[in-house]
Image (cartoon, grey):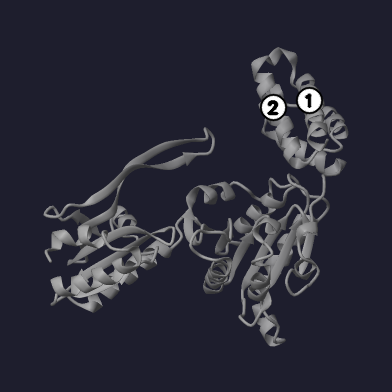
Amino acid sequence: MKQEELINEALRLRPSAISYYVTQQLATLFPDKAVIESDDAYFNVEKYGEDGQCTITSLTNQHNEFLTGWYETDYDFDTKEYIDGHLFKKAYNAWQAITWQATTFTLLTLRWELDNQITVHHWLIADTEQQANQFVKHVCRWNGELRSEILVFDDGCWGKDSILFQAIKNATFDNLVLPGTLKEAILSDLQNFFSTRAVYQHYHLPWKRGILFIGTPGNGKTHTVKALINALERPCLYVKSFKSRGFDYDNNISQVFAKARKMAPCLLILEDLDSLLTDENRSFFLNELDGFATNDGVVILATTNHPERLDPAILDRPSRFDRKYHFNLPALTERVQYMQLWNESLQDQMRLSEQTIVALAEATDSFSFAYLKELFLSAMMQWMAVPERGMETVMFEQVTLLKTQMTSEQS
């Protein structure tokens, strides 16, 4: 078979036969070369090349298929817009030449559907197996590094999210209001955990921690999680869902905990835990949480809006979630503090008096922090449309409107 015919012939086969067929044909086409096959998501040569780590050129004597698209970068959180980007070209079914550290490789990439899921395989052709292994290792290691990104597990695989990372960076304990000493207690809890590994080992205790934030939406759970990520400066893994096409729950949960153990000491974030767990995956999740495998150095930080939906085996057993912190509606003191923070950020002509802030705090007894934020945002927009009405008048009007909205939601 000729090299230019391989892609066409391979994609005519049933999906389960493609990988073996291609490997067999490459051994015939390149008898004096080493051939390495990989379907590892970290073997992303295109991103490696975009960073200037290697040079990628298409083999012009082949019929290659590429997908061209637009990649948006440099997200501006003030304007909520992308301010830059560039075109990318992604190999779907293609032959390419790779130049890396004075070494040249041939790369074949094929993409097809297997078990209702898109699979991508790469075959790297090199002079020696050592050269090929070295290149694969460098590419995977580079792609596995976090550079102003956070690892996110979704649809059965890990990916890196730079936008979520930037959103997290904007959250600190300085702009967080919680009742009493709650935020100090939470931060101290986890700082002490990460600094006392030797103590755990001395007393033969498993060096792991489970923290559960409980409370209705909009009362600071997510902000606290983000602030902790910033303050603790530990690797962070964020789970969006255990669901995926083509893999079962057990496999995905196993992937998540395997990655956390590998990156420990780290934070494993399970937001809205009640929505992540089902009757099908609960047992396997519990086994990964405190089964035979050790989770040394892993802090599992979970949140839930609905603790009543969690199994008592999760909610009430200390070895799984050692501490539970409750996030309730802000009391008068917290509402005043929150409004004072907002007031400091306003322009002079919009700023409220201390007396007005106290009156507004008293009028917003049933408001969550999320509703208090909406109060300021909606009032600012209304004031900018008709500034002569005065910010104080607009604020109290918005309190009335939001109370009506809250009543409607609850009925």
Is the residue 256 above or below the residue 74 in the image? below
Depth order, front residue of 123/42? 123
Regarding residue 340, the answer to whether it shows in the image is no
On screen, residue 332 above or below 181: above
Q: How many marks?
A: 2
Q: Can you give x and y, in whole percent of width and height, for residue 38 in the image?
A: 33, 69
Circle 2 Cα neighbour tier, 10 Å, few/some/many (<14 / 14–19 / ≥20): some
Residue 338 location, quadrant:
top right
Per the image, the residue denoted by label 1 is 401
Question: Would you name the residue on which mark 2 appears?
Answer: 378
Amino acid on which disc 2 is placed? Ser
What x and y, as percent, mark residue 190?
A: 69, 66
Residue furthest to the top: 388
Horizontal side of 106 relative to 409 (left or right) equals: left
Residue at image point 60% right, 56% down: 230
Q: Quadrant of residue 138?
A: bottom left
Pick whichever, 95 or 190, lies toward us. Answer: 95
Instruction: Name the quarter where the N terminus is drawn.
Output: bottom left
Q: Nearer the viewer, residue 131 or 174?
A: 131
Q: Are marks 1 and 2 in contact (CB under 8 Å)?
A: yes
Kindly indicate the quadrant of the structure image that contains residue 299. Answer: bottom right
Gap in Å between the C-alphas at discs 1 and 2? 10 Å
Q: Amino acid at mark 1?
A: Leu
Q: Residue visible at 28% across and 69% down?
A: 135
- Label 1 or label 2, whichever comes before in sequence order: 2
